[in-house]
Structures are given as structure tokens and as C-alpha cells.
């Protein structure tokens, strides 16, 4: 062996390559396209939040915080959840501050999943779920949302495949991972869905991980049904949320997990050797900002206006709009555009749309492990109105 050569070793994640989000964002930058692919805002956060964090820095809150998170923020989260979902989580033993939603999900999986355990995910699913399961030694059991098509064969909506989910649950099932509001489809779970899930797991030892990072983006007068709002499910669940999504600061990477004491105890065992603790001044700043509930209660109206503006513009095209009752994503079926490119698979269509039309989107097929084509792509409308207007002008020329 060449002494200057780096030794090779087996990859822990041999199937993982560059994510579609990185690929499409790079392509958008290369072609100066409007990036409606990656899910982050192109507008600034509230200056008051910046001021609150700055004040925390100037108050010398710059050293390691407690491993579980700053007490003021944990108590604020406890009060928020209690007010919204009528479930009390003890700030000392049931709430942990994390380095964003992804770390929360990763740590929750590592804390309870081991070799031979099965974890059920519902595809299309966010791409961080499966690698975490793989690294924990678990086995991913992927079931797919049922695709509902209209009379012309275009995708109209998605439904939870309850029969398939029921058949997937067995004594090896350690964890079921749900996501509401859902990325990428925007669908939301209602109370009857939570009741149905509770009935399926009632006589099992399966745990639940509920990814609720878009909890404050539910539209048309509907409400978000958190796992915390269902006492039976809350007793066996990790609840994950994110300040990055809620307060337009995705780059800060601050989130949290709420879970019963037994689950939190195991979660913190991994958390303390994963990140140990999270950015101190941002926690203090978020605690101050969180005290004013209007900052999250007004979010649905804020994003609904953007959703409605974007949908109104897309309705002037031949894209088939799918429902978007939650999240800041709008899915669309391109199969009836009446152009040759409408016959492309989703990934190639998105590459063409980015390079030739100048608007970046994400193929929904990227959210499946196995190739699954439905002619549907995902746009992100968490953008300034002018950004959306410019994108719509280009899309309306198709």
C-alpha cells in the first residue's frame, strides 16, 4: 500500500450521494434560475428577533447552556404546547432543545432503534429519515401514500393507506414516523387520523416520532392536530418541531423534542454525546421572542396569502394543482402541459425547468427510495411576492 494513500473503508451509508436539494440549488445558481426548490425563505426574519438574540449576547449569555437547553426556552415551549394542544410537558424532564429538526429526528431514532428493529416511514418522505435508521442498525419499512387520480389520470391528492400501515405493524416494529403537515405533499392529519393511528398501535409496543416542523402552517381555517393533542399517542411519542421554520431562521438550526420522561431520558443520553448543547444566545433570544404568541399564531395567515397568490398564478397554466392544506409547499402535476418535456421523468423535467425555463423545483420522486414516478413536482412558496411573481411569469409561458 502506498503510505501516502488514504486507506479505504466500508461506507456506513453506501447508498447515499448528493441530495436532490443540493443538485437543484447548484443548477439554479448555474443558470440564474429562480429557486423554488429548496425549502427556505428569501425574506428576512423579524428584526426584533435579531435584537433579542443580540441582547442575549451583550448580556454575556455566550457560554455552554444546560445540556437539555436554556430553562427559559423550555418553559416557554411547555406553555406554548399546553396552550395550543392542551397537553402539559414538564420543562425539566420532557423537553429538550436541539440543533434543528434534523438533529432531533436523528437523535430520537438513535435513542430507541437498534439492530433488527423495524421503523415504518410513509413515502414520499423527507430524505433524513432513512439514513438515520440505517445508522442505528434498524430496517426501514416504507409504505407509500395512496395516489388519488382524477378522471384524466392526473394526480389529484394523496391519502394515508391505513390497511397497508396496519399490515406493516408487527412485533418488530419499534417506531412509526409520521409527518404533519407533510413535506412534500402539504397534506395534514386530522383528529380522525390520530384516532386511527392510536387504534393500530394500542396493543403494541411501537413508538411514534411525529415530525411537526410545519405545525404553524395550516390553512383555510383548519387547525393542526399535534400528536400532543392525543393523550394516548403522546404517551408513546417524540414530538419534533423547529424554530427555524416558524420564525424564518432556518440557518440557526434550533428546534426541540417533547416526549414523556422515559423517552426523554433515552433521548438525552444520545443528545449529550451528539451535540451536547445548542447555541446559547439564540436560545435566550428565542425564549424572549416566544413569549409573544402572535409571532406564531399569525403565521398561517402570512403563508396562506403567499400560497393563494402562488396558486392563483399557477391556475393560469396547464399545471394541475394539488391541494396544499399545510406546509409551505405546493405540488403540481405537469403531465398535461402539452409540451414534449411533459413526458420526461420528474428529475429530468425539473432539470429542464431549471435550465431552460429558469424556475427550480424538486421532483417528488426524490422522496422515495425506489423509483416512483407520478408526474408531480414540488414548489416552495416561502418567498417574497415579487420572487413568486417573477417565477409565475416564466411558468405561465409554458
Image (cartoon, rainbow, N blue to C red):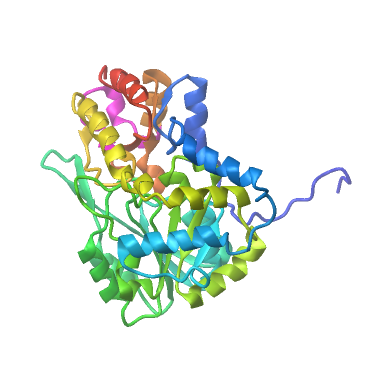
Does residue 371 appear in this view? no
- Per the rendered image, the range of residues in magenta is 331-347
Q: How many labels does the image show?
A: 0
* Rendered location of residue 155, percent (x, y): 21, 42
Residue 371 counted in the magenta span: no
**Can you say which quadrant of the picture contains the C terminus?**
top left
* Rendered location of residue 209, percent (x, y): 42, 65
Residue visible at 30% across and 38% down in the picture: 302
| Residue positioned most to the bottom | 203
| Residue positioned most to the left | 151
Does residue 273 appear in this view? yes
Q: Which of 200 and 152 is in front in this view?
A: 200
* Rendered location of residue 258, percent (x, y): 45, 65
Q: In this view, does 302 lie to the left or right of 96?
A: left
Residue 345 counted in the magenta span: yes
Residue visible at 36% across and 71% down in the picture: 234
Residue visible at 59% across and 52% down in the picture: 14
Q: Which of 294 and 166 is in front in this view?
A: 294
Q: Which of 339 and 2 is in front in this view?
A: 339
* Rendered location of residue 188, percent (x, y): 27, 53
Q: Nearer the viewer, residue 341 or 27?
A: 27
Q: Is residue 160 left or right of residue 273?
A: left
Q: In this view, does 333 lie to the left or right of 241?
A: left
- In terms of image quadrants, where is residue 248? top left
Relative to 177, does residue 128 appear above or below in the rendering? above
Amino acid at each position: 500500500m502506498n503510505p501516502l494513500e488514504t486507506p479505504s473503508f466500508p461506507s456506513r451509508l453506501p447508498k447515499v450521494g448528493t441530495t436532490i436539494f443540493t443538485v437543484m440549488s447548484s443548477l439554479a445558481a448555474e443558470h440564474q434560475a429562480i429557486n423554488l426548490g429548496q425549502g427556505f425563505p428569501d425574506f428576512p426574519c423579524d428584526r426584533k428577533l435579531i435584537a433579542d438574540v443580540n441582547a442575549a449576547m451583550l448580556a454575556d449569555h455566550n457560554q455552554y447552556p444546560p445540556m437539555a437547553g436554556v430553562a427559559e426556552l423550555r418553559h416557554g415551549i411547555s406553555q406554548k404546547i399546553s396552550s395550543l394542544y392542551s397537553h402539559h410537558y414538564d420543562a425539566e424532564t420532557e423537553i429538550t432543545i436541539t440543533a434543528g429538526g434534523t438533529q432531533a429526528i436523528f437523535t430520537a431514532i438513535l435513542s430507541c432503534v437498534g439492530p433488527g428493529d423495524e421503523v415504518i416511514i410513509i413515502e414520499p418522505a423527507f430524505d433524513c429519515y432513512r439514513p438515520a435508521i440505517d445508522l442505528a442498525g434498524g430496517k426501514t419499512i416504507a409504505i407509500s401514500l395512496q395516489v388519488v387520480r382524477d378522471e384524466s389520470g392526473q394526480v389529484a391528492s394523496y391519502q394515508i393507506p391505513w390497511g397497508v400501515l396496519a399490515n406493516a405493524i408487527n412485533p418488530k416494529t419499534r417506531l412509526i414516523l409520521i409527518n404533519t403537515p407533510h413535506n412534500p405533499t402539504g397534506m395534514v392529519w386530522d383528529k380522525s387520523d390520530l384516532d386511527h393511528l392510536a387504534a393500530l398501535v394500542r396493543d403494541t409496543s411501537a413508538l411514534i416520532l411525529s415530525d411537526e416542523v410545519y405545525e404553524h402552517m395550516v390553512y383555510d381555517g383548519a387547525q393542526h392536530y399535534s400528536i400532543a393533542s392525543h393523550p394516548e399517542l403522546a404517551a408513546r411519542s417524540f414530538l419534533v418541531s423547529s424554530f427555524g421554520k416558524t420564525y424564518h431562521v432556518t440557518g440557526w438550526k434550533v428546534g426541540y423534542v417533547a416526549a414523556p420522561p422515559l423517552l426523554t431520558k433515552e433521548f438525552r443520553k444520545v443528545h449529550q454525546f451528539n451535540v451536547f448543547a445548542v447555541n446559547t444566545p439564540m436560545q435566550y433570544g428565542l425564549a424572549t421572542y416566544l413569549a409573544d404568541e402572535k409571532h406564531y399564531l399569525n403565521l398561517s395567515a402570512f403563508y396562506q396569502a403567499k400560497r393563494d397568490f402562488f396558486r392563483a398564478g399557477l391556475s393560469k397554466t396547464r399545471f394541475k394543482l394539488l391541494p396544499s392544506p399545510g406546509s409551505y409547499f405546493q405540488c403540481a402535476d405537469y403531465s398535461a402541459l402539452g409540451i414534449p418535456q411533459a413526458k420526461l421523468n420528474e428529475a429530468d423535467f425539473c432539470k429542464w425547468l431549471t435550465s431552460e425555463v429558469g424556475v427550480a423545483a424538486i421532483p417528488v420522486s426524490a422522496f422515495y427510495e425506489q423509483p416512483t414516478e407520478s408526474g408531480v413536482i414540488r414548489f416552495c412558496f416561502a418567498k417574497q411576492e415579487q420572487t413568486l411573481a417573477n417565477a409565475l411569469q416564466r411558468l405561465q409561458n409554458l
